[in-house]
Amino acid sequence: MQKNFSRFKTKNSPTSNITILFGCCDIGETNALLPIINTLIAENEYHIDLITKNPATELIKRNTNFIKSHEIDPNPTLIITGYSKDSEIQNYLLTNAKEKNIPIILIEDFPGNFIRYKQFLKQLDYLPTLICAFDQAGK
């Protein structure tokens, strides 16, 4: 795990052994992921881990009940992330997913941003399992 990433875990005790790892760097992708994260936390079924970098770290601290952690599950069941210009976290997550055969979902977080997103995807040697588009143009 990269040293410059912040790591978080939920405070709750979920009912299943499934761990979902989220990753985010910038405000746009964090805002896109927060409703998903908070819904899953409220359902209390899954272990939710998160890795972030600023400015996402501060937004997460203000809008979730995560606690800072030194350890996260090294073998999550599923990885969910967005796309950021600073794609260090996404690159780490995609590499981890490929090495461990973990399904990964990428969320496009900005309407009409598909051209930039498509360029990012062309650079990858491992494509996500699922891509969720923000708008019709992205589909």
Image (tube, helix red, strand yellow):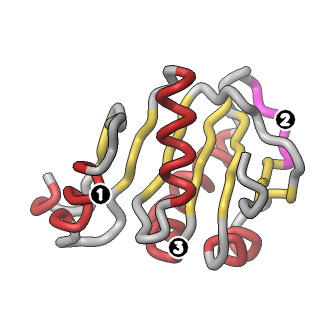
Between 24 and 5, the residue placed more toward the observer is 5
Which residue extends farthest left?
A: 137
Q: Is residue 7 left or right of residue 126?
A: right
Which segment did they paint magenta? 11-15
Image coordinates for residue 127, horizontal then vertical, percent: 32, 37
User: Taking 2 as reference, is 131 above or below it?
Assistant: above
Instruction: Provide the secondary structure element on which disc 2 rests.
Output: loop
Q: Which residue is mark 1?
A: 120
Residue 46 image position (x, y, % from top left)? 68, 33
Q: Main secondary structure of the magenta part?
A: loop
Q: CA distance from mark 3 to mark 1?
A: 16 Å
- The earlier-in-sequence mark between 2 and 1 is 2
Q: Nearer the viewer, residue 128 or 120?
A: 120
Query: Label 3 belongs to which residue?
Result: 26
Looking at the rendered structure, the kind of residue marked 3 is Asp
- Label 1: few (<14), some (14–19) or many (≥20) C-alpha neighbours in 10 Å: some
* SS class, disc 3: loop
Q: Residue at x 29, y 50 (%)?
A: 123
Q: Name the image quarter holding the N terminus.
A: top right
Q: Which residue is mark 2?
A: 13
